[in-house]
């Protein structure tokens, strides 16, 4: 473990949520914290998971384990389990330190956003010069009806969410394309002007915000709250790869809390260092960005720890561990596939048969 940051991993061969619940109860997640049968012992613990479904399943895992803990049924207050990105804004009204959350404009509803964007899309189409409109080929979609406008508005809304989730500056789009295609790209930029010029004013008039921007703001406020006043009880973030920048910031804060821990889903600790480094190397090929370990490699780099400092919560059963190792070899980055000649002898025919 690196410094005060605590990051662990549950291997792919182990059931994630039951393993997480068991590790918290028996003291493997947070040093000095162990469930001793006291009904209120878990009440101060907070666990962040990626989705509502995972939150429900984790609560169920705790109930199942507590019913058998110590050889008999036990009653206990369960930990607070929250989906990442979903925080109770109503609590802010009773929290003197949560004023920034109260000041956030509510997110606009999905249907309302589409119905507001569609007229702007149709107006853009009508403003196109005739000679530009005549040169559009079949692959360039121009709305010709209300249904087409809503269809294109949906794609525009999705693009807004992606840009705001990543925290990218819209102004960078202006220099994205040069050369012979620059003229056509300018037409695209004129279309995106709906977002950069008109849309902010509409949101301001209605005192609303974009959903992705609102979610990221809430996550960052939660990170600031935890950093400012670290809770006395355990704070655990489990199952997230930190693909959203705001979430990665929250995970970094949790990893550094006195009673905090981040539990990763299936970090490959067997892949050699050169191959793992190639996944997030500057200037890596676009195909590398799709590697299953890319998000985790980027996350632990952002937290500021090395892969060797990440501990496994539990060891996977031997056949499943072999399977994970084989898959890791098969998905080795192209930059280091020459290592296959060295790693192949590690797997006997019997090992491969057991793994498959």
Image (spheres, grey):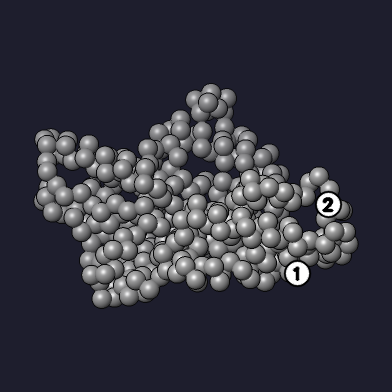
Q: Residue tagged by mark 2?
A: 136
Residue at 51%, 28% (x, y): give it.
355
Question: Disc 2 versus disc 1: distance between alpha carbons?
Answer: 22 Å
Position of residue 306 measured from the top left corner of the image (x, y, whole percent): 49, 61
Taking depth in this image into account, of 72 and 132 the one nearest to the observer is: 132
Quarter of the image that includes the N terminus: bottom left
> For residue 65, what is the image quadrant?
top left
Q: Is 118 or 317 nearer to us in this picture?
A: 118
Q: Which residue is mark 1?
A: 175
Label 1: state its secondary structure: helix
Q: Write the residue at 11% across / 50% down.
A: 39
Image disc number at residue 346: none
Q: Quadrant of residue 132?
A: bottom right
Q: Residue 348 in the image: x percent, y percent?
A: 57, 28
Which of pointers 2 and 1 lies earlier in the amino acid sequence? 2
Q: Nearer the viewer, mark 2 or mark 1?
A: 2
């Amino acid at each position: 473990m690196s410094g005060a940051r605590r990051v662990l991993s549950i291997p792919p061969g182990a059931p994630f949520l039951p393993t997480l619940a068991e590790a918290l109860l028996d003291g493997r997640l947070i040093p000095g914290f162990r469930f001793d049968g006291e009904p209120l012992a878990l009440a101060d613990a907070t666990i962040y998971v990626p989705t509502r479904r995972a939150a429900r399943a984790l609560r169920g895992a705790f109930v199942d384990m507590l019913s058998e803990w110590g050889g008999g049924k036990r009653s206990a207050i369960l930990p607070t389990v929250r989906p990442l990105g979903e925080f109770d804004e109503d609590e802010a009204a009773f929290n003197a330190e949560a004023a920034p959350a109260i000041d956030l404009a509510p997110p606009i509803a999905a249907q309302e956003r589409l119905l507001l964007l569609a007229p702007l899309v149709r107006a853009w189409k009508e403003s196109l010069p005739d000679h530009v409109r005549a040169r559009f080929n079949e692959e360039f979609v121009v709305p010709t009806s209300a249904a087409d406008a809503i269809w294109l508005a949906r794609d525009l809304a999705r693009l807004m969410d992606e840009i705001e989730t990543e925290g990218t500056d819209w102004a960078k789009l202006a220099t994205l394309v040069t050369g012979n295609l620059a003229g056509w790209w300018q037409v695209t930029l004129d279309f995106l002007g709906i977002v950069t010029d008109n849309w902010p004013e509409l949101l301001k008039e209605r005192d609303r915000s974009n959903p992705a921007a609102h979610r990221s703001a809430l996550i960052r406020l939660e990170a600031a709250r935890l950093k400012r006043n670290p809770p006395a009880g355990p704070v655990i973030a489990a199952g997230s790869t930190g693909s959203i920048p705001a979430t990665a910031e929250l995970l970094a804060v949790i990893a550094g809390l006195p009673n905090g821990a981040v539990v990763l889903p299936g970090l490959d600790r067997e892949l050699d260092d050169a191959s793992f480094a190639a996944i997030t190397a500057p200037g890596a090929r676009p195909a590398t960005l799709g590697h299953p370990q890319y998000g985790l490699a980027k996350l632990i780099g952002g937290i500021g720890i090395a892969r060797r400092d990440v501990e496994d919560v539990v060891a996977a059963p031997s056949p499943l561990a072999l399977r994970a190792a084989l898959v890791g070899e098969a998905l080795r980055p192209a930059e280091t596939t020459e290592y296959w000649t060295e790693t192949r002898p590690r797997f006997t025919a019997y090992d491969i048969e057991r793994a498959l």
